[in-house]
Image: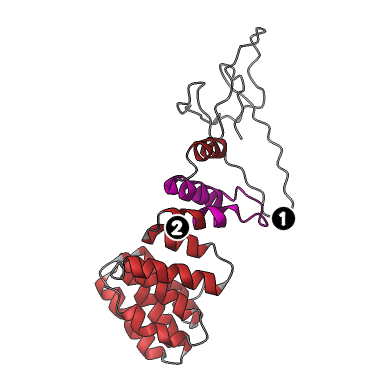
Amino acid sequence: GVAMVEARAGWNRVLVKLCNDDTDFSLYVRLSEADGTLMRVVADPAGATTASPATGVPSTLPPPPGAVSALFEAALLASPNDAGLHESLARYLSYTGGEESTQHRARDLAGRAVELRPTPRNCLFAARLQETRDDTARLVRQALELAPNEPEVQLANAYHVAGGASGERALPLFEAIAPDTTFGITALTARARILARLGFEESARGLLETLDARFPESLVHLRARIAREAGLGHLSVAD
């Protein structure tokens, strides 16, 4: 939500009440001037406990700007067949957790975007929001038909196959992804995990060592390597 408040010259105390039923408590605050430009905010290094006194003359504040979701909804109402707006609102709701888990609004908006103008990008996004494997498979296949040589699409297809009953069938799919990209690095680490799960620990380690040599500074690979080594019992938390 958006609220207009009057700040005083000097130190201001911010009091927040958080109400939450089923997830961790958290708070994100963006402070700005009345025109929307960012406000420079610092904490008192001395730890001030007393706020600056009020001026005694209340200010006349402008109305608050519209919340992001409200702006999206208004734009969508004006352009109901705009695939980009459907996808953008779906992403906003998904990334911010801005809907009840039982509403599935993001899923429905993403699906509508695909109906209006399918692209590999919105097909994959919609696929991630599906609740059934069949619906996910349908959208991944649609993305694959639109862009069969796109590494991100190939990776999504390989992961979908890997999540099935015969995950080893995804090995050649991961292997077909060009290795010199972020998606290729992810594919190589996925191959290593499958091989390790099948009992081919040395082959898995060989892939990881190849990645070490070719992409020593890749964060994608480093995270996967740490997780893999920890899973094999070769790495402790202290390391």
User: Is any part of residue 221 visible from this angle?
Assistant: no
* Residue 69, quarter of picture: top right
Task: Tell me which amino acid carries mark 2.
Answer: Val
Residue 34: say if magenta.
no
The secondary structure type at the circle numbered 1 is loop
Label 2–label 1 contact, CB within 8 A:
no
What separation in Å lies between label 2 and label 1 (alpha carbons)?
32 Å
Quarter location, residue 62: top right
> Residue 42 at x, y = what percent?
51, 30
What residue sits right under mark 1 in the picture?
22
User: Which mark, by number, is residue 114?
Assistant: 2
Above or below residue 95? Residue 171 is below
At x 45%, y 79%, the residue is 161
The reply, left or right, for residue 42 in relation to residue 52 is left
Q: How is the image coloured?
A: secondary structure
Q: Is residue 102 on the magenta stretch?
A: yes
Asked if residue 116 is positioned above or below residue 48 in the image, the reply reads: below
Of callouts 2 and 1, which one flags the residue occurring earlier in the amino acid sequence? 1
Nearer to us in this view, 83 or 157: 83
Tag of residue 174: none
- What residue appears at the point 65 percent right and 21 percent down from the top-left corner? 51
- Which of 86 and 237 lies nearest the eye of the viewer? 86
Judging depth in this view, the residue of 53 and 123 nearest the camera is: 123
Label 1: few (<14), some (14–19) or many (≥20) C-alpha neighbours in 10 Å: few
Residue stretch rendered in magenta on the structure: 82-110
* SS for dot 2: helix
By secondary structure, the bulk of the magenta-drawn segment is best described as: helix
